[in-house]
Amino acid sequence: MTSHDDQEQRGQGTHPEAEFGNTVPSQNAVVAETTPHKPWYRRIRWWGWVLIVLSAILVVFAGTVGTQALLVKHHEEAAIAVVKDAVKKQRLNDLDGVVADMQKQTRAARDITNGPLWSFTEKLPGIKGSMRVVRMMTDVVDDIAQDTAPKFADVVQSVDVKSIYRNGSINAEPIVKALPELETAAQSLQRYTEEFDRIPTPRIGIVANALNSSRGMLDRADYYMQAAVDEYIPNLPTWLGYEGKQTYAILAMTPGEMRASGGLIGAVGTVTITDGKIEIGDFEANMKFAGDNITARNLSEDENRLYREEGPMNLNYDVRDIANSPDTVRVADYFRAIWNQTEIGKDTELNGIVLADPLMVQSLVKVLGDVTLPNGTVLTGTNTADFLVNTPYKDYPAEETDAMFGTVAKACVQRLMGDLDAGKMAKLASEMLTLAHNRHLAVYSFDPTMQQIF
């Protein structure tokens, strides 16, 4: 029989074991807390470090290659900017400096693409083809800058610009005389253009677009240069009237009565070129070229059926109606048929036509300067078109209205021939292109070679 004291002793005897068991976890926690943690970089295994290093190398490599690509783009754009700036500032007296500046930029781009890092990228799968194409492009562009550009600069410097324009006439002889040197430069351009055209198209779109865009510009430049050497320059004496007078009819259109080619022909004038001198003749009323006996008789079967037999307009196809066709070639054919029936046409060969409306004359005034009429009226680059369309019919006698167009045109041509400089010619060319695009101006020559220009 167990006493109460024995039970207390047994109970007390179990306490040390229980207390010991309870203290074990707390001791482990203390040990864990007192054990120092390893730094994060010591917990990374060796292969992790290898991956980190490789990633860093790839980032640096990609950044370096990207930087080089941007530098190449910058140098090529800078080379183009040099040429544009030279044209804008008319640095024709410093062509050697212009060429040297351009060569500096193209050579810098070439040095990058022929460096060791770029060469290494040409061995990497996925981009090697595109990197090779960029190198080939910079090589050809630099060859053009180093070899072709100096040849063209020498040609320009060999020609005395002042001798081209003298005493109000354009002298073709200095240009024709420089033709052999120009042929050499053109051959150089053709050789590098063909080399550029052989560059394969890469897979990366941005590089392919740059290649195709550059190829298009270079091909056009080469085409026009070869045409200039083979056809345009040899024909300059003929076109400038040194081998016989050239006569073009100016068909003055009025937008008051719209036609497919621009407007009704209100007056007809002439521009003649003789020994390099350009002169504007008198403008005659359209009725001098109209009437039952003076019409275009060379209509096609369809044109005759649509516009004379069945159509609602029933046109007479005298000079007033010929602008009905949207095709300048057909308008020229119509007018030549009419011209040959007139007194002037029987003795004068027609070499081409010029279709022009008042906006064309206004552009001449805008570029060449204001024109003051005999009565003191000042025409500017903003009011000329409105004046020609409205004022002559309100304030001038009927016999003077047709001559007004020619009066302003004559003044502009006289000013042009009296002060022929590159800046004005460039502005005038820009204006004419815009006018032609908007159908305010059209030119057609019956000379097959000159047709290619217009």
Image (cartoon, rainbow, N blue to C red):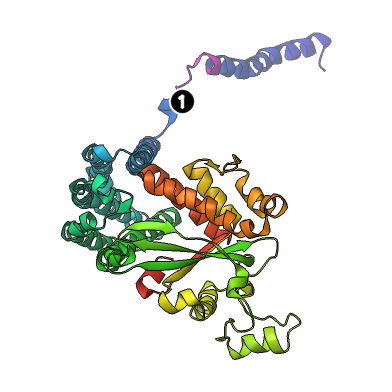
Above or below: residue 352 compared with residue 192: below
Q: Quick check: 12 left or right of 75? A: right
Q: In which quarter of the image is residue 12?
A: top right
Q: Quadrant of residue 325?
A: bottom right
- State the SS at label 1: helix
Residue denoted by label 1: 40
Along the line of sight, the residue nearer the viewer: 108 or 214: 214
Q: Give how far across and how far down residue 78 sits, in percent.
A: 35, 39
Q: Of the residues shown, which amino acid type is indicated by label 1?
A: Trp
Residue drawn at the location 55% of the way across and 54% of the way down: 360
Along the line of sight, the residue nearer the viewer: 237 or 415: 415
Residue drawn at the location 22% of the way across and 39% of the way down: 100
Along the line of sight, the residue nearer the viewer: 297 or 211: 297
For the record, the magenta segment spans 32-40
Taking the magenta stretch, the answer to whether it contains residue 39 is: yes
Taking the magenta stretch, the answer to whether it contains residue 345 is: no
Q: Look at the image and tell me whether residue 425 can be seen.
A: yes
Q: Give how far across and how far down residue 311 sits, in percent.
A: 73, 84
Q: In which quarter of the image is the N terminus?
A: top right
Packing grade of label 1 (10 A; few <14, some 14-19, many >=20) is few
